[in-house]
Image (cartoon, grey):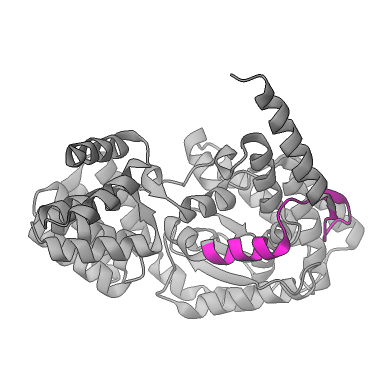
Amino acid sequence: MNPAHPVRLLALLVMVLTMAGCAVNPVTGKKQLSLIPESQELALGAEQYTPTQQTQGGRFYLDPELTVYVREVGMKLARVSDRPDLPYEFVVLNSSVPNAWALPGGKIAINRGLLVKFEDEAQLASVLGHEIVHAAARHSVQRMQQGMLISAGVAGLGFALSDNEWAALIMGGAAVGAQLALAQYSQSDELESDHYGIRYMKAAGYDPQAGVELQELFLKLSQGRDSSWLNNMFATHPPSARRVQENQALVQQLGAGGYRGRDVYQRRIAKLKELQPAYDAYDEAMKLAAEGKMKAAMDAINKAIRQESGEAKFYALRGRIYENQKQRDKAQADFDKAVALYPEMFEYQLYNGLNAYELNNLDKSRDHLERANQVVQTSIAYLRLGDVAKRQHRRDDAMRYYSRAAEAGGDIGEEAKRKLAEMSQ
């Protein structure tokens, strides 16, 4: 290594820090390093909001009024926050994992699996207030900057893309968004979000005691669970007895009491509770399929479909089970149904395209794989698009697709490199 390289790197870092200077945290008023301007922060959140939702289950579309309600509650808190002018958005995601997250710029998501754990609107407000602080205090941006300083890029952040089966194959911006949404916050960031989130609750008229109850709920849910389950469930918000204690001390200081909204909340989530048995059957089918018990998995997913015939993910899972059983025509019918119900969801387009390729329906495969990559880019989609193009004698397209797939690591990247080399001979 050239000994001058570390010197040049240090000089570059000093220059960047000098140009960036310090900024004031809009929530705490404390000085902090600011390498990323607000305009870039807002653009990043806006660009990655939809792709990141899709890597975490996609929208819960069966009850659109539930998302309207969550948005109404969220905006009550956003208006009393330290950054009320951020372009806040709120969405309910179709995931059983009890979690919530925020992207820069106030792009916030909460899973249906967390909503069913709450008793009233104040508890919902507690989570949304917490996430609003993460956005208002620029916590995601700060973590991103730390990654930049360590590795000169977002790749320095450690993260997991939940249990999405395409996690290791996701490329491009969606991977960045998932890093920011799911990388674990520091303990200080979590305590800060608890503290100011409770203050936002109080200012919006909610009972701040719900903030204590939230952490007590998380601790209760974590009891007796193995570490892998906890990593998935609390990817961003690990439970802590210290947080319960500190939240309680703050509530005693502010004074408990305020709006709870139990009756309203229970009415608003009635549809979700009605659907819960169908989602329980789906989760059981997923578990059985992962264990290789395909007949039992098929029974469970058919039960889910009988209970709710309008849920796209149920058909997508049944199609995957049919694929496993080499019944590709039946799989195709189910993937078509999933796409018809939720055409924006990249996973269903991807399943459809991959299965169509195996059925030698190249035009259909190309169409669905391209649609999938328009929302979330995956190395497997690029690889199969290359295969389609090669078989259709579109050499330049094939090489372009293989080149993109080759950017990925693992078996997909190696296969793409091999095919690219063969075409280059």
Q: Residue at x 53, y 64 (%)?
A: 47
Q: Residue at x 59, y 61 (%)?
A: 44
Q: Residue furthest right?
A: 253
Magenta stretch contains residue 46: yes
Expressed as whole percent of the image width and height from the top left, the position of residue 401 reads 28, 51
Tell me if residue 100 can be seen.
yes
> Is 370 on the left-hand or right-hand side of 90?
left
Expressed as whole percent of the image width and height from the top left, the position of residue 360 reads 8, 57
On screen, residue 307 above or below 230:
below
How many numbered circles are shown? 0
Towards the viewer: 205 or 35: 35
> Is 223 on the left-hand or right-hand side of 166?
right
Expressed as whole percent of the image width and height from the top left, the position of residue 312 reads 30, 67
> Is 246 on the left-hand or right-hand side of 411?
right
On screen, residue 341 above or below 104:
below
Expressed as whole percent of the image width and height from the top left, the position of residue 114 reads 54, 59
Magenta stretch contains residue 415: no
Q: Residue at x 22, y 70 (%)?
A: 337
| Span shown in magenta | 23-47
Towards the viewer: 360 or 287: 360
State which quadrant residue 424 falls in: top left
> Is 87 on the left-hand or right-hand side of 137?
left
The quarter of the picture where the C terminus appears is top left
